[in-house]
Amino acid sequence: MNDLDRIADDIRLCHKCPLAQTRICAVPGTGSGKSDIVFIGEAPGAREDREGLPFIGAAGKFLDEMLADIALSRADVFVTNVVKCRPPDNRDPLPEEVRICTEAYLWKQLEVLKPKLLVPLGRHAMHRFLPVTEKISEIHGTPVGITNPLSGEKYVVLPLYHPAAALYNGSMREVLKRDFREIPKMIEKMKYEK
Ligand code: SF4
């Protein structure tokens, strides 16, 4: 069992915050433990809670479509959420729940994964990494540097709209696809900056 699997096991058994009382399944995340790219949503939804997997359903299908568009699949990236258990009635996670969960798990997952690029999906996930004064309508597709508070490692964050926001909005779909196409270019550029 590797470090990422160990963290996932801890998440599945976790009772560190009140969300443990209402979840069905915790959702640690899935994908490659060696990927340069980590996609991060805010929290699992109802279907994710039932199945223990991130980004399934219609938004997840669109995520898969955008990955395919840049010649990637779920097996090539890691997909997770800021908070690993579903808040009841799809409410926003409370600041204390976010603090406990990110300190216990997300930063540790990133420390193990050592990605080049973090891609928060949607403004809620984005605001876990960038100041709340940032507007996703202005900053989407713009890379920003951040530091892991646990390890001191540096990452580039590329905030993108949430796939669900684009499901029934043709122009938003095009914006999101255009932003996605920046991902391979950025990864390629980072190889030469090492
Ligand atoms: S949300 Fe995070 S901290 Fe809270 S119970 Fe789930 S895994 Fe534990």
Image (spheres, rainbow, N blue to C red):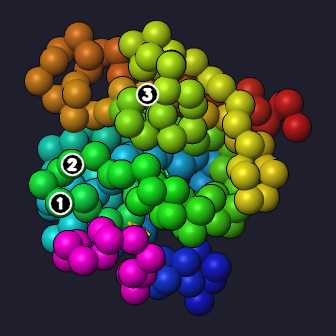
Q: Is mark 3 on a helix, strand or loop?
A: loop
Residue at 26 percent of width and 16 percent of height? 172
Q: Residues within 10 Å of mark 3 (few under 14, many from 20)?
A: many
CA–CA distance in space, label 1 to label 2: 6 Å
Q: Position of residue 19 (x, y in %)?
A: 30, 68
Viewer-side label of 1, 3: 1
Kindly identify the amino acid type of the residue bearing the numbered disc 2: Arg
Mark 1 or 3, nearer chain start: 1
Q: Kindly indicate whether the residue at mark 2 contacts the one at mark 1 (C-beta within 8 angstroms).
A: yes
Residue at the disc numbered 3 = 160
Viewer-side label of 3, 2: 2
Q: Is mark 1 on a helix, strand or loop?
A: helix
Question: Ligand 1 is in which quadrant of the figure?
Answer: bottom left
Residue at the disc numbered 1 = 88
CA–CA distance in space, label 3 to label 2: 21 Å
Q: Residues within 10 Å of mark 1 (few under 14, many from 20)?
A: some
